[in-house]
Image: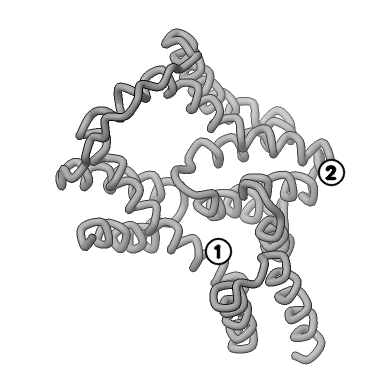
Amino acid sequence: DKERATIAVVAVLLLAWAPGAIGMMAAILLGALAGLALGKGQVTIGEHLPVPVSRKAGLTAFALFAVLLIGLPILAGQAQGWALADSFYRSGSLVFGGGHVVLPLLQAETVTPGWVSDDAFLAGYGVAQAVPGPLFTFAAWLGAVMGPAPNGVTGAMIALVAVFLPGFLILIGALPFWDQLRRTTWAQSAMQGANAAVVGILGAALYSPVFTSAIGGMPDFALALICFVALMAWKAPPWVVVLLAAVGGAALSLVM
């Protein structure tokens, strides 16, 4: 509807003005508040879902999540391994919505400090699109190819565990309270607004870092358009589209 479309557009504009984690969290928070103001949430009374997690275990998981979020930045200055865990844990903690939302966060944590080159970052993103599974597995690529040690298999394991761990802790923490939350109108309204903001965040992530880094001119744009048509109109498998983009990119580098 037009209200949620407006929330998505406002989220894009906010990220254009304040890119990064702060802008992303602000967009989600404002989206949730807008959803509350609109109050369009509808409660669906479904079957009660038994949850094998006690409230005590849930609160413990939330506490561990907070301790790691606060403690890892303190340890980051002690060794590169701690810095690696801190960067990916923070990225995993701040994501809400689809996996593509994590792209600007991972770019800021790995490309900006010089751990990973921009080309390696985009190449890994392309490979992650070609294989099944969540996009968060892209973290393993970044941990493996980064310059400072630990890298390789060790870096991949640290990055992979660190980026997934916050989601698992939040899930365990929220499960004991989820059945109650999903039966409240205000929670449904807030989630609808936040989800609309995530749509805007995904649009912003498509522009930066993907479009701004990968499209260097009209030939690149033409190749991207061909791949888009192959994927959406001709229903080509993602791995075929990625292979087509790789071959086309290699050909353009030889010609240009």
The first of marks 1 and 2 along the sequence is 2
Q: Which residue is mark 2?
A: 152
Measuring 73% from the left and 76% from the top, which residue is drawn there? 244
Tell me which amino acid carries mark 1.
Answer: Pro
Residue 177 lies left or right of residue 150; in this view the side is: left
Residue 9 visible (yes or no): yes
123, 190: nearer the viewer: 190
Residue 20 lies left or right of residue 35; in this view the side is: right
234, 105: nearer the viewer: 234
Tell me which amino acid carries mark 2.
Answer: Gly
The x and y percentages for residue 109 are 60, 47
* 244 to 92, vertically: above or below: below
The x and y percentages for residue 249 are 74, 79
Q: Specify the quadrant of the image occupied by residue 55.
A: top left
Q: Which residue is mark 1?
A: 209
* 77 to 114, vertically: above or below: above
197, 112: nearer the viewer: 197
**Mark 2 Cα shell of 10 Å, populated few (<14), some (14-19), many (≥20):** some
